Image: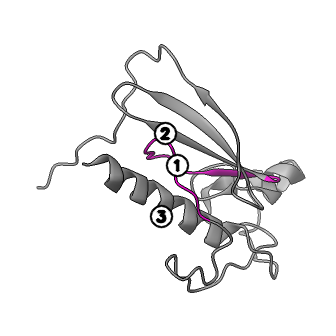
């Protein structure tokens, strides 16, 4: 895939996550019982990984818009190009959005300001033996 296509996909991924999980709104119910009852409040209040706290796809205190448009900016807080393409889920913690990116030769972690989209910092990841820079191919049956 061309570098430009990866940048567009990575940027679209960031937009989608920001639209879904940063706007404030009404309290969303979460399933009763389970490990979340004893989890620290900070874990519940943030988006620590894929599908959010506890993998339920629900984040307390948030009500995302049901529609958005990346081209016009409707219901989009911000969008920025991501330096390297990524396949992982963003982590939203406090006022920061963390992303990873990789190519066949480089790997990095990025920290963006959740309010403005400004890149706060980036770190190169070196000497990761056996790690993939792209998702595995899925075979059709």
- The answer to whether the residue labelled 1 contacts the one labelled 2, judged by CB atoms less than 8 Å apart, is yes
Residue 109, image quadrant: top right
Name the residue: 54% across, 68% down: 16
What residue did someone put label 2 on?
101
Quick one: SS at disc 3? Answer: helix
Q: Earlier in the sequence, mark 2 or mark 3?
A: 3
Q: Earlier in the sequence, mark 1 or mark 3?
A: 3
State which quarter of the image contains the C terminus.
bottom left
Which residue reaches farthest right? 41
Alpha-carbon distance for marks 1 and 3? 10 Å
State the image coordinates of residue 120 (x, y, percent, origin top left): 73, 42
Name the residue: 62% across, 49% down: 49
Q: Which mark is residue 82?
A: 1
Alpha-carbon distance for marks 1 and 2? 8 Å
Q: Nearer the viewer, residue 106 or 40?
A: 106
What residue did someone put label 3 on?
12
Our reading of the magenta stretch's main secondary structure is: loop
Name the residue: 62% across, 40% down: 110
**Local crowd at mark 1 within 10 Å, few (<14), some, or many (≥20)?**
many
**Local crowd at mark 3 within 10 Å, few (<14), some, or many (≥20)?**
some
Q: Relative to residue 127, is residue 119 drawn left or right?
A: right
Q: Relative to residue 41, is residue 88 drawn left or right?
A: left
């Amino acid at each position: 895939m061309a570098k430009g296509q990866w940048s567009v996909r990575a940027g679209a991924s960031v937009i989608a996550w920001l639209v879904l999980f940063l706007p404030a709104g009404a309290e969303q119910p979460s399933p009763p019982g389970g490990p979340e009852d004893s989890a620290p409040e900070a874990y519940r209040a943030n988006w620590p990984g894929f599908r959010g706290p506890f993998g339920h796809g629900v984040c307390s205190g948030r009500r995302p818009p049901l529609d958005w448009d990346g081209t016009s900016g409707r219901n989009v807080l911000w969008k920025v190009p991501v330096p390297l393409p990524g396949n992982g889920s963003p982590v939203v913690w406090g006022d920061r959005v963390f992303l990873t990116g990789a190519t066949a030769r480089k790997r990095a972690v990025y920290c963006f300001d959740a309010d403005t989209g400004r890149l706060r910092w980036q770190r190169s990841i070196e000497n990761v033996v056996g790690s993939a820079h792209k998702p595995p191919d899925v075979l059709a049956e």
